[in-house]
Image (cartoon, rainbow, N blue to C red):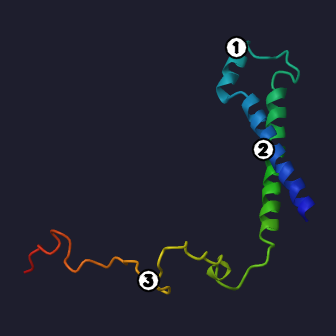
Amino acid sequence: MSVLLNVILTAQILTALIMVGLILIQHGKGADMGAAFGSGSSGSLFGASGSANFLSRSTAVLAAVFFACTLALAYFGNLQPVSSGSVLENAAVVAPPAAGIPTADSSAPAGAAVPSAPAVPAAGAGQIPTK
């Protein structure tokens, strides 16, 4: 199964790169106006309109292959078994606290002063008038 996924992923990456190259090679719709007045590439390898036809058809074929590879990767990605439990049930166990840091379940070492909350609110907080 892993070999098949690697082959499909490789095919998708290659088709994407080749498709980008083919799209960058193609000329825009506005370039046809110059060909109408005689400055076109009629002496090219594919003829006057052959390159546009060849490039657009090969781009369409590569787009179809890219789409098929995407669907295949999505299908194989969803074949993994779905857990019926919560995500939190599979969470990692929390590491114990570092030494010297008191926690709620551990007692403070003898002679260590544990700071307590101030009895008087901070300056200004107790000064808010009530109606």
Q: Is residue 101 left or right of residue 81?
A: left
Query: Who's the residue at 25% across and 77% down the image?
Result: 118
Identify the element where label 1 is drawn: loop
In which image quadrant can residue 130 be found? bottom left
Q: Is residue 94 left or right of residue 22?
A: left
The residue where tag 3 is placed is 110
Q: Is residue 17 among what the camera can see?
A: yes
Query: How far apart are the alpha carbons under marks 2 and 3?
Result: 67 Å
Mark 2 touching mark 1, by CB under 8 A? Answer: no
In the rendered image, which quarter contains the N terminus? bottom right
The residue where tag 1 is placed is 37
Query: Who's the residue at 37% across and 78% down the image?
Result: 114
The residue where tag 2 is placed is 16
Mark 3 touching mark 1, by CB under 8 A? Answer: no
Query: How far apart are the alpha carbons under marks 2 and 1?
Result: 35 Å
In the image, 104 versus 82, the foreground residue is 104
Return the disc, 2 or 1, that comes first in the chain's sequence: 2
Identify the element where label 3 is drawn: loop
Return the disc, 3 or 1, that comes first in the chain's sequence: 1
In which image quadrant can residue 122 be found? bottom left
Kind of residue indicated by mark 1: Phe
- Give percent across and percent down for residue 54: 85, 33
